[in-house]
Image (spheres, rainbow, N blue to C red):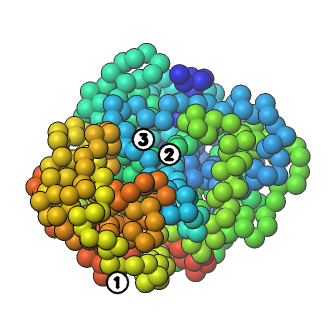
Amino acid sequence: MRQNNTRGRRARRGAPSASDRGWDDSMYEDRPTRQLRQARPGAGPDGPYARDAVEGQVRPRRKRRVLRWFAISLAVLILGTAGAGYLYYQHLNGNLNKDALNLGDNKLDKSDPNAKGQTPMNILLLGSDSRAGKENVRLGGSKGDATRKPLADVQMLLHVSADRSNMSVISVPRDTRATIPKCTDPDDQKVYAKTSDKINTSLQHGGPGCTVATWEEMTGVPIDHFMMIDFSGVVSMADAVGGVPVCVNQNVSDPKSHLKLKKGESTIKGEMALSWLRTRHGFGDGTDIGRAKAQHMYMNSMVRQLKAGTKLTDPGKMKNLAEAATKALTVDDGLGSVKKLYDLGNDLKRVPTKRITMATMPWRYSGDYVVPQKDDADKIFSLVRNDVALDGKDRKKAEASKKAQPTEPSQPKGKIAVRVMNGTGTALQPPVSGRASVIANALAQKGYEQATADQTPKSQADTTISYPREDQRGDALAVAKALGVPERLVKHSSAAQEVTLVVGADWRENESYPKSAGGHGKGGKDDNKAPDSADALRGDDKKACMKVNPNYTW
């Protein structure tokens, strides 16, 4: 059951407006106009309360809507500063809101461990526009939305490799059209029927667990945890590291978000950091696509700050930050304590900055929606499913590993024991009945007389062939070749007891593996790297500079 009730809900010349492309402009609605009665920060000509050209008139103050992002911001800061004091605040456990991980009827099986027993980890980071609570209303404005169900306007998948050598973060635009599976709210047992809508609305179908179910259906990636934050506590998060360096390639002035910076590098904090994170019109094409890129740059820069030794040494500030952070956070039960967050932080700290890659799901416009770009989106999620880093550096490691292992069968095929399992079920499709038996029989006809069908239920996006010992790699490769399964889907797993074939959702018919399945490539040089359309950014790229929309310069 859920604990606590708080749940984290264009003006371009010569080009289609953001509204034309279906992007919601409501986050820039105006507050009531009011006069400035006294000098205050931001009241000057460059501040958010700057006067208009007409003397004595004050520009309407824009809503302090916090960017529909900051899931990863809070996550990084909590994890990065956990050791500085979180273990001293056990009462903070009571601040954490907890919710069910997955509200769908069907769930993907967790990732198998590698040969060393290490398991990759996938965390869904969500930013909610919830107005629940006075602070969220103050920051987000729009008191009329206080009772509206929140939207998950920022969604990022954080994938940490099994050996903790690398991390990938993939953003999905909030207006991506997705199939939202049937979900049941654990609080009132209300059932939300399967539907097709913008992915940010999935949060309104019972909570973050329905967004998790939607992601599993869309990507085939099993989600281990989620972390969701709302507006409150964000200013404290922005100030916690003492400012974050950012860069723009031109002077930028976005009156919607109040961002105004000079060309080159600036160090931002507080409300200016919020302005950076919520700026859309001033960057790229004026949509969430450009904003996602700016968020990635900010996150990478903040991680570098933390890695460089940024510390919180003031006990009072640390306590206030801890209170604000935990009250703003909703997690699944698996992360439902400060100790668990602390342990997770220690785990993530092992990842070198240069092996962190931030990317955006390859996409294209389709009317009022964004939709995945078929081949490239399939590729990037296939890389994650197969625990391959987006930076392309895993290719040499994989090649070296293959050279060190046998490629020939250890025994005649008639003596190779093969366990076949049916993993064709997904969040939206029931399993294909008898699939394990069909493939086991096909193997028997090819001389693999020890192939047997295991009826244990499974759910897996990709077909895989795993083997428990290195000397069995040749056996697994022989089975793969007999069925047309690509070599890259053959894996060494400590969870396997024998050569095990899981028939995934990518192989729902026929006795031979479909040539068009498998997500990415045929083993070439670029198969183990994010496609260019993902606009990937490395964590150690200190020269990255945000491209400013030419209509928002000064």
Residue 360 horizontal side relative to residue 17, left or right: right
- Kindly identify which numbered label has been placed on residue 224: 2
Relative to 542, is 162 above or below? above
Q: Is residue 288 left or right of residue 122?
A: left
* Residue 3 visible in the current orientation: yes
SS for callout 1 = loop
Q: Earlier in the sequence, mark 2 or mark 3?
A: 3
Amino acid under disc 3: Val
- Residue 38 x %, y %: 75, 43
- Residue, x 32% and y 78% (percent of image)? 408
Element on which disc 3 rests: helix
Left or right of residue 478, residue 112 in this image: right
The residue tagged 3 is 212
Q: What crowding class fits label 1: few (fewer than 14 Cα within 10 Å), some (14-19), or many (20 or more)?
A: few
Give above or below for 207 relative to 11. above
Mark nearer the viewer, 2 or 3: 2
* Viewer-closest of 58 and 246: 246
Q: Kindly indicate the quadrant of the structure image that contains residue 491.
A: bottom left
Any part of residue 31 in sight: no
Q: How many marks?
A: 3
Residue at numbered disc 1: 525
240 vs 213, nearest the viewer: 213
Label 2: how many Cα within 10 Å (few below 14, some 14–19, many 20+): many
Q: CA distance from mark 3 to mark 1?
A: 32 Å
**Amino acid type, residue under disc 2 in the picture:** Asp
Whole-percent x and y of residue 463? 28, 57
> Please, what is the three-letter code of the amino acid marked with disc 1?
Lys
Q: Are marks 3 and 1 in contact (CB under 8 Å)?
A: no
